Amino acid sequence: MKKSLSILMLVIVSLSFNACSLDDDDNTNFKYVNLKVLSAEVPEAFEYGERYTIFVTYANPNTCTYFEGFDIHKHQLTEREVYPIGTELIGNDNCQESTEEVEVSFDFEVIYNEDYLFKFWTGQNADGEDQYIEITVPVNQ
């Protein structure tokens, strides 16, 4: 009896999660987009254990896109891919193309004694391959 009750509860919980799919929501009025980096300002060198502010200038594609933050991917011990992320309003006919350049920043803590490689996303080439500005920052011992 106890086992049957546990299985029944598991089935009920599973069905309730499936009923709440976010993919079926037609009321979403925005989407997340990567913002193209134009330039990045990093220190010439890091000191181990210190914290730094890294400045990034991105191209705002239109008047309906707003900066939300950064998505930073760690691929190797000291390699970071940096993507500024924005939300773009959907269904707004008042959006206009923009040539605005916006500077934003994030804090970075040096936790390894090896050189860091930052790859700032600049968009995709004609073949759909991601392109980056690559900057290596040495860590002083």
Image: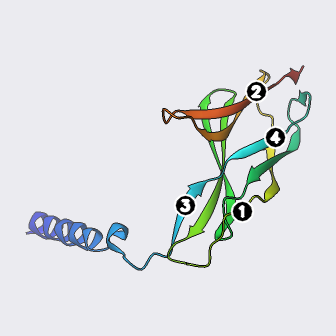
Quadrant for the C terminus in the image: top right
**Which residue is under mark 4?**
40
Label 2 vs label 3: CA separation?
27 Å
Amino acid type, callout 1? Ser
Location of residue 35 with respect to 14 vertically, above or below: above
Give whichever of discs 1 and 4 has the lower sequence position: 4
Q: Residues within 10 Å of mark 4 (few under 14, many from 20)?
A: some
Query: Within 10 angstroms of label 1, few (less than 14), some, or many (20 or more) residues?
Result: few
Q: Earlier in the sequence, mark 2 or mark 4?
A: 4
Label 2, label 1: how far apart the Cα atoms are: 33 Å
> At label 2, which amino acid type do we have?
Tyr
Q: Are marks 3 and 1 in contact (CB under 8 Å)?
A: no
Task: Give x and y (percent) for residue 42.
Answer: 86, 37
Circle on res. 98: 1
- Front one among 99 and 10: 99
Name the residue that disc number 3 marks: 32
| Contact between labelled residues 4 and 3, with CB atoms less than 8 Å apart | no
Q: Which residue is mark 2?
A: 116
Q: Earlier in the sequence, mark 2 or mark 1?
A: 1
Residue 118: image location, x then y, percent? 73, 32
Q: Is residue 111 left or right of residue 123?
A: right
